[in-house]
Image (cartoon, grey):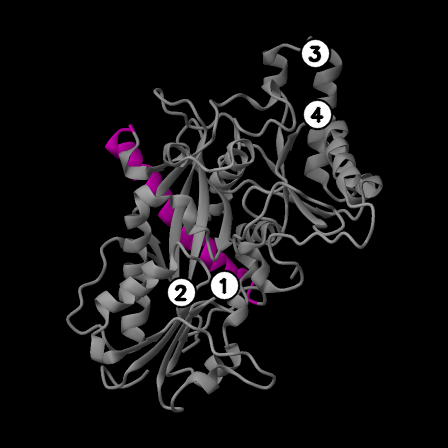
């Protein structure tokens, strides 16, 4: 670690997100003395053979990189581990890829049956499908899913179509393993419904190889960078997104009496070094566009009553009106602690989230060390999504790297601003020896510290 407070920090901030970029810059300027901060928001010109070192005035300089994953100079950071801090781990797919996350949880729960993850994560079935005609073959080893579908088939044979019969069925939610922003999510309860989903995607594929589809990850399907929340619509082709997970659908969810729309909780998480995990207390509740309906009460493509992803709501608003209405977005995102629930209920939900979050990161780092490698001179922010069922049990849905802060909206921008100030206090200042006299951020709750021996 550099000598405390001795050197200027050359900070390069090019987050490539117009919403959060000024908030990061503001956080740095407000917490680092002006004479200690040399800030630039322009990436150095990329030329063959160049590296981040070309932008550093001297090898001994303290360097802070807060840039997109693709722009991080991991090689420079590795060779300057005591003076260069970067804003992402190189490998973290054990958490951020849906099909890896389920395996991560399975591995930990097998070793530790009492782990909170065993009671707060729905085990998924992961499979790969190139084309719809091969779906049946892809599910040969999806034993739980096949057993569930057989169970549902037996119910259907004797069913009179009543809600009571439908409620006896197991419902599943299908998610493309490397998509984000709600892309391609569908519900199903029978093999016929699942087959119809893939048949439709095959029909929607371009007629020619000349018509390329670039996924939410910019096409980088084989890199660990591809699970950040990027811009995307609701278009999926199996030829580009071959990995899928089917997860038991959480029904019924917790609903508010005055606003019976399904919601999930977005939690911002900071991981530092190797490895301490912090949960930001000011969480968000993201609501679906329409009042909740049970899974059997709407069509397969009617996602507005069960999908709580606000980016798709914004896209639908743009498609229908040409512009996103601020009132529509604001109505879909609310402060968690302002929800009309008993204070004890809110605190219990938060406590469950803290416990599950800490366990999930420890599982990734210890049960899947090849696919999650914390670095001592790195930090990373994540967006974790949780669902609460009607009994008050919290369920981990997924983890996102480079989360989409824009979904917070302008009305709640101070939540994101406060989070990034917490990031600077908790991750940046201590690394560069500038934390003397700086109080800890009480909103950044430490939920797990794991000694991985990486210093």
Residue 274 visible from this viewpoint: no
Give the residue at mark 1: 365
In the picture shown, does residue 147 fall above or below 118? above
Image coordinates for residue 127, horizontal then vertical, percent: 71, 47
Relative to 328, does residue 91 appear above or below in the rendering?
below
Our reading of the magenta stretch's main secondary structure is: helix
Give the structural element (helix, strand or loop) at label 2.
loop
Residues at discs 2 and 4 in contact (Cβ within 8 Å): no
Number of other residues with Cα within 10 Å of mark 4, as a class: few under 14, some 14 to 19, many 20 or more: some
Disc 1 to disc 2: CB gap under 8 Å = yes
Q: CA distance from mark 4 to mark 3?
A: 12 Å
Q: What residue would you read off at disc 3?
A: 159
The image position of residue 133, as x and y in percent, is 84, 40
Q: Which mark is residue 450?
A: 2
**Quarter containing the C terminus:** bottom left
Q: In the drawing, does residue 343 fall left or right of residue 183? A: left
State how far apart marks 1 and 4 are (Cα): 37 Å
Q: CA distance from mark 1 to mark 3?
A: 47 Å
The stretch of residues the image draws in magenta is 340-369
């Amino acid at each position: 670690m550099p000598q405390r407070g001795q050197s200027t920090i050359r900070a390069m901030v090019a987050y490539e997100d117009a919403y959060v970029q000024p908030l990061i810059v503001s956080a740095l300027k407000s917490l680092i003395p002006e004479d200690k901060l040399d800030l630039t928001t322009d990436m150095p010109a990329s030329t063959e053979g160049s590296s981040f070192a070309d932008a550093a005035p001297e090898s001994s300089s303290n360097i802070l990189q807060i840039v997109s994953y693709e722009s991080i100079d991991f090689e420079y950071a590795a060779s300057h581990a005591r003076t260069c801090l970067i804003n992402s781990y190189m490998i973290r797919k054990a958490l951020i890829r849906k099909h890896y996350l389920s395996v991560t949880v399975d591995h930990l729960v097998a070793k530790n049956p009492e782990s909170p993850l065993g009671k707060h994560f729905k085990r998924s079935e992961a499979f790969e499908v190139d084309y719809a005609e091969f779906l049946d073959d892809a599910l040969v080893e999806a034993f739980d899913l096949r057993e569930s579908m057989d169970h549902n088939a037996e119910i259907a044979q004797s069913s009179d179509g009543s809600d009571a019969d439908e409620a006896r069925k197991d419902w599943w939610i299908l998610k493309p393993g490397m998509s984000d922003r709600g892309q391609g999510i569908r519900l199903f309860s029978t093999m016929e419904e699942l087959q119809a989903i893939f048949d439709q995607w095959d029909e929607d594929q371009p007629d020619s190889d000349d018509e390329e589809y670039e996924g939410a990850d910019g096409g980088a399907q084989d890199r660990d960078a591809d699970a950040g929340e990027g811009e995307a619509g609701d278009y999926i082709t199996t030829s580009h997104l071959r990995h899928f997970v089917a997860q038991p659908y959480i029904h019924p969810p917790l609903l508010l009496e005055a606003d019976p729309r399904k919601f999930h909780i977005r939690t911002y998480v900071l991981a530092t070094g190797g490895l301490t995990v912090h949960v930001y207390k000011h969480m968000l509740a993201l609501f679906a566009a329409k009042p909740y309906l049970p899974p059997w009460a709407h069509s397969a493509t009617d996602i507005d009553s069960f999908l709580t992803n606000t980016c798709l709501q914004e896209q639908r608003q743009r498609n229908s009106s040409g512009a996103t209405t601020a009132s529509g977005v604001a109505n879909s995102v609310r402060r968690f602690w302002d929800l009309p629930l008993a204070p004890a209920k809110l605190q219990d939900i938060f406590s469950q989230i803290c416990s599950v979050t800490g366990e999930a990161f420890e599982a990734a780092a210890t049960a899947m060390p090849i696919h999650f490698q914390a670095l001592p001179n790195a930090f990373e922010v994540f967006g974790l999504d949780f669902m609460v069922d009607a009994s008050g049990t919290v369920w981990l849905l997924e983890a996102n790297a480079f989360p989409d802060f824009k979904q917070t909206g302008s009305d709640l921008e101070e939540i994101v601003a406060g989070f990034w100030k917490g990031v600077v206090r908790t991750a940046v200042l201590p690394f560069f020896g500038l934390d003397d006299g700086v109080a800890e951020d009480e909103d950044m709750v430490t939920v797990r510290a794991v000694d991985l021996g990486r210093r």
